[in-house]
Amino acid sequence: MMTPSASAGTDLPIAALLRDRLDHWARVRPGDTAVTFGAQAFSWGQWRERILRLAGALRAAGVRHGDRVAVLDLNHLATIEVTLAASALGAATVPVNFRLSAEQVRYILEDSRPVILFHGAQLAEVAAAAGADTLVPRRIVIGGDDEYEPFLAAGQPDEGADAGPDDVCLVMYTSGTTGRPKGAQLTHRGVNAHGAACCAAMSLGADSTIVVAMPLFHVGGSSYAQVGIHGGARMILLREPAPAALFGAVASGATHTFIVPAIIHGILAAGEQAIAAFSGLKSISYGAAPMPVPMLRQALDAWPETDLVQVYGMTEISGVATLLTAEAHRDSAHPERLASGGLPLPGVEVRVVDPLTLKDVKPGDRGEIWLRSAQEMRGYLNKPRATAEAKTADGWIRSGDIGRVDDAGFVYVLDRVKDMIITGGENVYGPEVESVLSACPGVSEGAIIGIPDERWGEAVKAVVVPVPGAEVSAADVIAFCRARLAHYQCPTSVDFVEDLPRNATGKVLKRALREPYWAGRERVI
């Protein structure tokens, strides 16, 4: 089944390169505040001047078209500035996950081969242990004995002119829930198409103030920052999404933010004062991990005047692919759509394909979600085979997600292809069961995994985090599910844990949950 989207319109001039929109706002609104980071604040005109100087400094340091520079730090203005400056020279920026081990950082440095590594002072030991001194020609420290600001200030303003729309501007390494991460190469054309579509769909523009709280090594951080620049919004960049920083940003006049459901869960659990603090936001976008419907209903009740916007996407499509609007969230005629990822963004096409036959399934049937858009990546860095597996010759990106599309075009994401459980010939999709599981009294959150079963091939197991102080048994959980689900979908056993393992972006690591049960078996998980 294929679902096209409507085209987007805009009154802004077309942005061919990443820095074009920054140049536009610096020309028409030079004195307006563009970005705030801690004690730093720059107008559009001032910020453009910094980017030009940084571009000159990078050129003087030997950065050329096709090169890559890397940034290893918690969220810092330098990451966004390096991205804008390097891209004007035709170079790409690699934001490295600061939560990785030294060995994992080394892998990314070996794979991307940056000519310069900018790293936070507090991550100097990680950079050294990762072999940065031998793998990267030059290191520049951010913060501490700061080398970044003097490096930038010494640059001669450089307008750039070496880049083209299809050049790579960002290499975003996938979160890597299985195996080694892959570097998705995002282009000027793709990131700008994403920015234009998101601004239109999120009602985000020059009168908005966005909070960038997600880590910049993730598209929820870097791509969201570019969405703000595209729309001319004032940006408040947070070092990390600590509660005090988030509340401070909202109190300072923020109107929009993008956060993961785990943060929303924390705010709701913190009580009335925290909930009230966030009520000043015009819009809260969320994604990167599933939002249980009971929690979503709680959020809708807690913030009746705030637009809640759910997004579904992936690194390989520069970020957002589908969006559930604020109106759809509160559409009493279609409450079932709260479980959907919404409609495709303008310019995004969706197909649902049988993963075995590679043919489109019938409307409403389940299959793998495929996406096609100008937002798509060029491919994975240094991995032509993985690129060919993920991207078809005619531009479709295979998401790896199982889903369906309803008669109105709403996209429902059911599970990962690799996480789908097959028990007795029946397919079980974790999120469907987890939505019920999260509503069980005494359950804070839970995950569904498949474990070996000699008769059925796989059996359904629930891994549950109980509410502190609650008394809930495995029998309670199983009985609750059996009253609401088909028998084959229900867990046959329950494990209780204090926390669910997650990757850096909040996704539950089901592979880690399954590993003890599948160790020594032939199945690859």
Image (cartoon, rainbow, N blue to C red):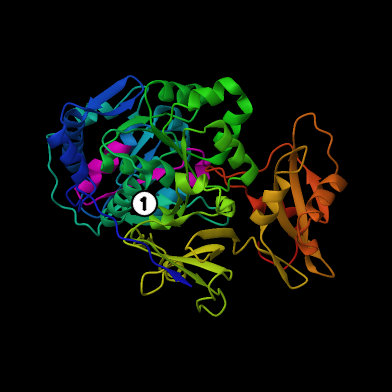
Q: Residue at x 43, y 44 (%)?
A: 220
- Asked which quadrant contains residue 362, the reply is bottom right
Residue 324 can be seen in this image: yes
Taking depth in this image into account, of 193 and 512 the one nearest to the observer is 193
- Image coordinates of residue 484 in percent, x first then y, are 76, 54
Residue 223 vs residue 402: left or right? Answer: left
Residue 519 can be seen in this image: no
Q: Residue at x 52, y 32 (%)?
A: 303
The span shown in magenta is 80-105
Count up the numbered dots: 1
Q: Is residue 15 magenta?
A: no
Up-down relation of residue 421 to residue 314 (above or below): below
Q: Is residue 98 magenta?
A: yes
Q: Residues within 10 Å of mark 1 (few under 14, many from 20)?
A: many
The residue carrying mark 1 is: 171
Tell me the kind of residue under disc 1: Val
- Asked which quadrant contains residue 83, the reply is top left
Taking depth in this image into account, of 288 and 204 the one nearest to the observer is 204
- Image coordinates of residue 190 in percent, x first then y, are 31, 56
Residue 294 vs residue 124: left or right? Answer: right
Q: Residue at x 32, y 24 (%)?
A: 146
Up-down relation of residue 251 to residue 5 (above or below): above
Say what secondary structure mark 1 lies in.
strand
- Image coordinates of residue 297 in percent, x first then y, are 60, 40
Up-down relation of residue 482 to residue 417 (above or below): above
Taking depth in this image into account, of 517 and 413 the one nearest to the observer is 413
